[in-house]
Amino acid sequence: MSKVRVRFAPSPTGGLHLGGVRTVLYNYLFAKQNGGDFIVRIEDTDQTRFVDGAEQYIFNCLKWCGLEPHESPFHKGPFGPYRQSERKEKGIYSQYAEQLVKNGHAYYAFDSKEDLEKMREDLKTAENPSPQYDHISRKKMKNSLTLTEGEVKDLLDKNTPYVIRIKMPENEVISFTDMIRGEISFETGLVDDKVLLKADGMPTYHLAVVVDDYLMKITHAFRGEEWLPSAPVHLLLWKYLGWQSDMPQWAHLPLILGPNGKLSKRDGAKYGFPVFAMNWTDPKTNELTEGFKEKGFLPEAFINLLAVLGWNDGTEQELYSMSELIEKFSMDRVHVAGAKFDFEKAKWFNHEWIKRFEVSGLRFDVKNQLAQNNIIVSDDSLLDKVIELVKDRCTLLPDFVQQSSFFFKAPEQLDVDAVKPKWNEEKKAFFIAYAEKLAAIGNWELLSLETAFKDLATEKNIKPGELQLPFRIMLVGGKFGPPVFGIAEILGKEETLERIEKALVIFGS
RNA sequence: GCCGCGUUGGUCAAGGGGUUAAGACGCCUCCCUUUCACGGAGGAAUCACGGGUUCGAAUCCCGUACGUGGUACCA
């Protein structure tokens, strides 16, 4: 048994979306479990769609997710190149395409764009809105099956542009076993003669995957379900090229769906959630699509939620670390049906991960969030106390800003409206007295602050509850944040007194 | 249209002939807390439909409906 080699083959045409990351993840997990290699190869077959910077972007995303490949354009292994465009330069694809023509499994097609359009137009009926170039229609087209040898040679000599198409058998049933779905079969007569080699000499995906997988000794190929319909073409190619015994095992992963159908970039904009791992700016349109990272997700949570979108281990467990996933993931428990992405649940995962993280693991991110809001934290031990106090109520990383900025910077505005209606002289007197009491207090800690507060309230015959909200507004500025005495404790005597004093002026009488 | 794949609460899902049909998210009620959360206790809500097979079907078979993907010199 040869060593397991799994590959992810993105085309660098845009952002890396949820489905892509999940495919990578399953690749990675499977490779890890089997002590094999995880390979990333770039499918840049179509130069018109190649987007600047997209390749680097993909690797940045993988790095953030903790899914770094063993082999890639940046860490080359023995079976390169890792970009299809580089392999094309050596003429490898056309060589195999020619071989197929020679063996009678493919043919030259000289049809122009207009010829194809005409054929589609002519054959179009109400029942068949999209006619194919298949074993029936090819008989009427300009190709090496209909033309004489002399005519073909003549066209070739005159440098007539041509493509090479696979010659699908008229009447065969071809089947294979998918790792997730089991046995799947197709009738070849219903599949069209796909283009293998384009007029510009570039291979299409169909030829390229097969050749690349073979040359790179891939043993397992995972890809999205949208590829299932073209599987028969690939199967046949493996056979016609004489590599059948080396064919990888296939797994077609279920689709991740948006609110309506396959998840698209548009859905993200429309429903307000990210669809890409990280921010993606389209260099052509300059349009920015927000990523999960920038939205405030922890990579651990992102990986976790993707892992269980379409897979579970049969227990009630939902929270998995990467190492638990490596231990427990199994391909045969991956679902067959597509799953709708639920952003609410995604947020829940993040929340859970923030709660389960150690303070030290959050320090960097929180500092960063605060810095983005012009709050520079220099005291790490203070920051740690704050994070500990606050993290249970943060779902996304930016929530830390609202929940903790007032520890580092006095609130600029107080929510006076929340206090004013019930504010009176008695309450004002209470806080003046409380401030005096605090000024004299010896041990500045939560319990003594609270006891002093409640004792004084009882003494003044006011319900402590009615006083807590004003106190909170004084310290944090609004109706949020952790328990108020905990805040005062961390703020310290001087700062607390200062905020009370200032607020009393603002509240007036 | 044709082909492929699918269908358990609103969403993710367990269960694969006999179950009170797990659990999670979200929603609702209550407790805790007179901020907001966390936490705790409850609640509403599901086997797409129609036929078989069977003593018995969410589970097996066949149809239908619906969803989704493909049907490009895109991947």
Image (cartoon, coloured by chain):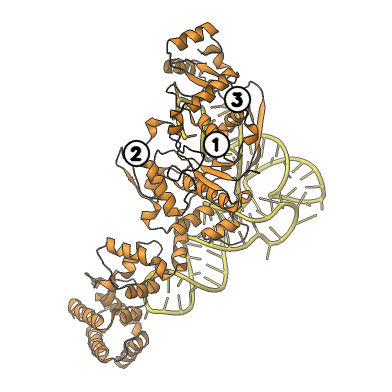
Chain colours: A orange, B yellow
Residue A52 is labelled as 2
Q: Residues within 10 Å of mark 2 (few under 14, many from 20)?
A: some
Measured Cα–Cα span from mark 1 to mark 2? 25 Å
Residue at image mark 1: A213
Nearest the viewer among A57 and A337 is A57
The residue sitting at 55% across, 36% down in the picture is: A213
- Disc 3 to disc 1, C-alpha distance: 26 Å
Q: Residues within 10 Å of mark 3 (few under 14, many from 20)?
A: some
Check disc 3 and give the amino acid type: Leu
Q: Earlier in the sequence, mark 3 or mark 2?
A: 2
Check the residue under mark 1 and report the chain it is in.
A
Q: Which image quadrant is residue B52 in?
A: top right
Q: Residue A190 carries which label?
A: 3
Looking at marks 3 and 1 on the same chain, the residue that comes earlier in the sequence is marked by 3
Q: Which of marks 3 and 2 is in front?
A: 2
Q: Do labels 1 and 2 share a chain?
A: yes
Count of numbered marks: 3
Point 53% across, 53% down: residue:
A307
Query: On screen, A251 above or below A33?
Result: above
Farthest residue toward the bottom?
Answer: A459
